[in-house]
Amino acid sequence: MPRRSYDQYCALARALDTVGDRWTLLIVRELLGGARRYTDLHADLPGVSTDMLASRLKDMEREGLVSRRRLAPPGAAFVYDLTARGRALLPALTALADWGAPALDEKRPTDAVRAHWFALPLVTRLGRHFAEGVDVIGVALDEGEFHVVLGTDDEDGPRYADGPAERPDIRLRMDTATCADIARDRLTLEQGIASGRIEATEPGAGDGARRRKSTATA
């Protein structure tokens, strides 16, 4: 079935022809964190029906935003990956997250939350506040962990992934309210660390981790 089009000779209209359908950009958000199985996507997109998710993934494959591949044994499951065209949406999603961040006031009782959903607004803020020598940053919330790779020496640029980093340069632990305040620019990383709302540690020799002095800039 052909997809609907705005039929306008306009770059924005062409973009919306491709990514303007409900759930499409949220699927991109999930896949920006790395390859995911269909069941993983469904679990982290609460509210989407199985039929809708399958339909959107087919549309996105046809538009060249995602590819599907089978993992090598013993996994042998199919996973979805963003193509280079799909990954190029990161700046657009980051801008939309910045625009939507002021709406993160009180969490509603019906709101679902996943830790890695905060990665988009944090990517630029972490890059802005941490000095050289900090490239991989682990972030732990009550709801789970994700990590950000600033990509200073990586042609792919900044990116993030669900779960803890294997060898982070620094680990940040905070509650969801603090993370939301950072996303809304009500709190800087430096202020959060100085006030104790953010615990910053780096891997250390011997007994695990030691507290890190703030490398954030004003």
Image: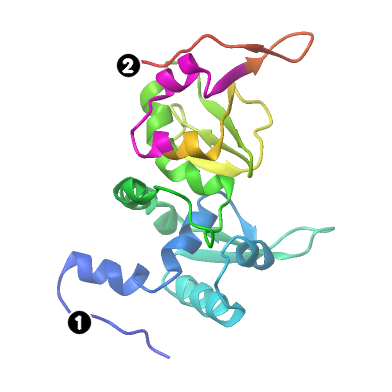
Is label 2 in a helix, a strand or a loop? Answer: loop
- Residue pointed to by mark 1: 7
Q: Quadrant of the N terminus?
A: bottom left
* Residue 12 % position (x, y): 21, 65
- Measuring 32% from the left and 16% from the top, which residue is drawn there? 218
Q: Amino acid at mark 2?
A: Ala
In this picture the colour scheme is rainbow
Q: Which mark is residue 196?
A: none
Q: Against 32, is 4 above or below? A: below
Q: Earlier in the sequence, mark 1 or mark 2?
A: 1
Q: Is residue 216 magenta?
A: no
Q: Which mark is residue 218?
A: 2
- Measuring 22% from the left and 80% from the top, which residue is drawn there? 6
* Residue 46 % position (x, y): 58, 66
* Residue 70 % position (x, y): 70, 64
- Which residue is situated farthest in the bottom direction here? 1
Q: CA distance from mark 1 to mark 2?
A: 47 Å
Please report the bounds of the magenta region as a residue range.
181-201
Q: Against 15, is 118 above or below? A: above
